[in-house]
Each structure stands twice: as structure tokens, then as C-alpha cells.
Image (spheres, helix red, strand yellow):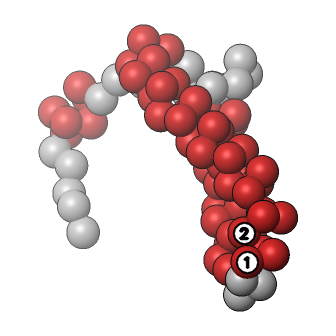
Amino acid sequence: MLESSPSQLRDARPLTQSMLAGYTVPAVVIRRFSAAIRQKFDTVCELDPRILVILQRLDEFFAVVEHAIDVIFSANNPLL
């Protein structure tokens, strides 16, 4: 378990919008990638139905990631 010294705790700053700005590009990439996966479902599943299970899990994962991104960047996030 990591221990924090009092000076580290005192120096801790809340996240600001400028600190999080670097994460907007990965967020866009993740959203585009997950949208592309969703569009390919039908075509890929016609080729090999076993891939459907993997694609469904990926879709669920990206849905969770997209929701987390929305929560982090929402206007009423107390961390911002």
C-alpha cells in the first residue's frame, strides 16, 4: 500500500479542465473506434458467428469507457 506524506497531501491539487484537456483526443478516438466496431457487427458475424461474443464484450467495454468519459467531462463534475 502506498503511503502519502503530509506534504504530498498538502500539495495535492484538484483536477482542472486544463489538466483534463489532454484526454479529449483519446476520448474522441475511443468513441470513433467503438462506433466502427458497432458498424461492423453484421458483416463480421456473417463470416464467423463466434466473433459475435468478442464483439459484444468489446461493445460493452467501450460503452463503459464512453460513460466514464462523459461523467469526467460533465459540467457538474465536482473535480473540475
For residue 39, side relative to residue 23 (left or right): right
- Relative image position of residue 57 (x, y in whole percent): 68, 72
**Which residue occupies the foreground of this view, 48 or 20?**
48
**How many labels sit on residues?**
2
For residue 12, side relative to residue 76 (left or right): left
- Res. 75 image quadrant: top right
> Mark 1 to mark 2: distance in Å?
5 Å
Q: Amino acid at mark 1?
A: Leu
**Which residue occupies the foreground of this view, 34 or 80?**
34
For residue 28, above or below residue 52: above
Q: Amino acid at mark 2?
A: Val
Q: Quadrant of the N terminus?
A: bottom left
Residue beneath disc 2: 44
Q: Residue furthest top?
A: 18
Count neighbours of disc 2 (C-alpha within 10 A) and say few if under 14, some if 14 to 19, many if 20 or more: some
- Relative image position of residue 27 (x, y in whole percent): 55, 34
Q: Is residue 50 visible?
A: yes
Q: Are marks 1 and 2 in contact (CB under 8 Å)?
A: yes
Q: Quadrant of the C terminus?
A: top right
The residue shown at (49%, 14%) is 17
Q: Residue furthest bottom?
A: 50
Residue beneath disc 1: 47
The residue shown at (63%, 37%) is 32
**Which residue occupies the foreground of this view, 4 or 56?**
56
Q: Is residue 52 visible?
A: no
The residue shown at (16%, 33%) is 7
For residue 33, above or below residue 58: above
Helix, strand or loop for disc 1? helix
- Relative image position of residue 77 (x, y in whole percent): 66, 26
Helix, strand or loop for disc 2? helix
**Which residue occupies the foreground of this view, 62 or 17?**
62
* The label number, if any, that marks residue 62 in the structure image: none
